[in-house]
Image (tube, rainbow, N blue to C red):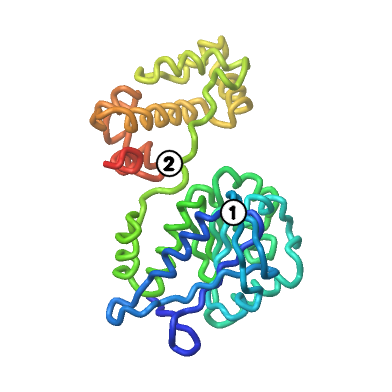
């Protein structure tokens, strides 16, 4: 724990940097968590949260109402912590060095000091990357934007499977809800687990979530949606027999190929080895059963071809980063 205080010993100054198209949910969750955090012994506020913009004034949101940012970049200069929520209008249009000198310098100055830090929520990571703050660092962003982010900012190591990344002075979160996880993490680092846990209880969210973004990503495209290819017959056949013990030889035979040729063609068409693809389809079917039925883990394993609950748990953890039980609890509220 590294207790943060303002220069006068009072609440830590936090600046929320907004731009046109800002997501109200993200702006609200920052104010809710940092703005209501209290010292458990005195009841005093631990943070003073200020909303600011590159230019003060009326800011459009991505909803049907505007907000007014009274403060400009002077609030960034005065802050110990700067948070950048997503702005879907502009984030993904940003390029390296395309943020503008004044804003880039303001953000860089925060982490050049002895204690400052900058964090982004969702695609707010594009702002930090455009300012050069993520060069040579690990970062995350919303999974739907991660491929574009990686292409646009090749000097950043993108980890699309986690809820947030803490690189010390620079932190990034995945989607909007993962911003809650990041904010609670930052508060926990500043003031301890008890303060963060109390905020989580008050907000009715878990103080810590298992797994990463992988468990929230939509299922891969089924074989039939890839269109007719040289291995589509075996893929369609396998999807109808996920509970059975399928071998590489059986799959290759369905497409009348040698195993060597089948392996090569399959990788060319799907980007995966046949058995990796098969195990992912089985995990996806297991996800459906965990969400929609009360089957035990052993029964889910039997119906998806894993054979045992232990095998299912191993593959589920490897693919999604979370156990079957934790996944079911997340998606069924159990």
Observer-nearest residue: 255 or 43?
43
Say whether residue 234 is visible: yes
Q: Quadrant of the C terminus?
A: top left
Q: Which residue is drawn at 42% across and 65% down?
A: 33
In percent of width and height, residue 115 lies at: 52, 80
Q: Left of 36 or right of it: where is 263?
A: right
Count neighbours of disc 1 (C-alpha within 10 A) and say few if under 14, some if 14 to 19, many if 20 or more. few
- Residue closest to the eye, 177 or 60: 60
- Residue 157 visible from this viewpoint: no
* Residue 215 marker: 2
- The disc, 1 or 2, on the residue closer to the chain's N-terminal end is 1
Q: In which quarter of the image is residue 243?
A: top left
238 sits to left or right of 170: left
Q: Is mark 1 on a helix, strand or loop?
A: loop
Estimate the x, y position of residue 177 in percent, counting from the top left.
46, 52
In the image, residue 123 sits, relative to residue 197, either above or below, namely above
Name the quadrant of the N terminus. Answer: bottom left
The residue at the point 51 percent across, 11 percent down is: 253
Quadrant of res 267 = top right
Q: Circle 1 is placed at which residue position?
A: 65
For image coordinates 62% across by 79% down, the residue present is 77
Q: Is mark 2 on a helix, strand or loop?
A: helix
* Observer-nearest of 57 and 228: 57
Q: How many marks?
A: 2
């Amino acid at each position: 724990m590294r207790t943060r205080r303002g220069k006068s010993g009072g609440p830590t100054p936090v600046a929320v940097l907004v731009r046109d198209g800002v997501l109200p949910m993200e702006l609200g969750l920052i104010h809710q968590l940092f703005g209501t955090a209290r010292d458990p012994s005195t009841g005093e506020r631990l943070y003073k949260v200020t909303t600011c913009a590159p230019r003060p004034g009326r800011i459009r949101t991505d909803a049907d109402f505007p907000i007014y940012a009274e403060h400009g970049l002077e609030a960034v200069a005065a802050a110990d912590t700067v948070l950048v929520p997503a702005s879907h209008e502009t984030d993904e249009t940003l390029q390296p060095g395309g943020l503008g000198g004044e804003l880039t310098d303001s953000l860089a100055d925060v982490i050049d000091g002895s204690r400052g830090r900058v964090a982004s929520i969702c695609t707010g990571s594009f702002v930090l990357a455009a300012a050069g703050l993520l060069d040579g660092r690990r970062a995350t962003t919303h999974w739907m934007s991660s491929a574009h982010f990686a292409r646009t900012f090749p000097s950043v190591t993108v980890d699309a499977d986690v809820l947030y990344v803490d690189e010390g002075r620079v932190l990034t979160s995945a989607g909007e809800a993962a911003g809650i996880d990041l904010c609670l993490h930052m508060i926990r680092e500043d003031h301890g687990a008890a303060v963060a846990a109390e905020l989580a209880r008050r907000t009715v969210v878990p103080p810590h979530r298992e797994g990463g973004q992988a468990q929230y990503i939509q299922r891969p495209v089924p074989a039939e949606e890839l269109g007719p290819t040289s291995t589509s017959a075996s893929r369609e056949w396998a999807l109808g027999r996920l509970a059975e013990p399928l071998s590489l030889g059986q799959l290759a035979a369905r497409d009348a190929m040698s195993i060597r040729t089948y392996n090569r063609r399959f990788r060319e068409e799907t980007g995966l080895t046949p058995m990796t693809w098969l195990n992912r389809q089985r995990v996806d079917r297991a996800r459906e059963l965990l969400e929609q039925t009360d089957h035990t883990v052993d029964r889910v394993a039997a119906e998806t071809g894993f054979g045992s609950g232990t095998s299912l748990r191993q593959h589920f953890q490897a693919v999604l980063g979370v156990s079957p039980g934790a996944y079911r609890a997340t998606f069924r509220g159990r």
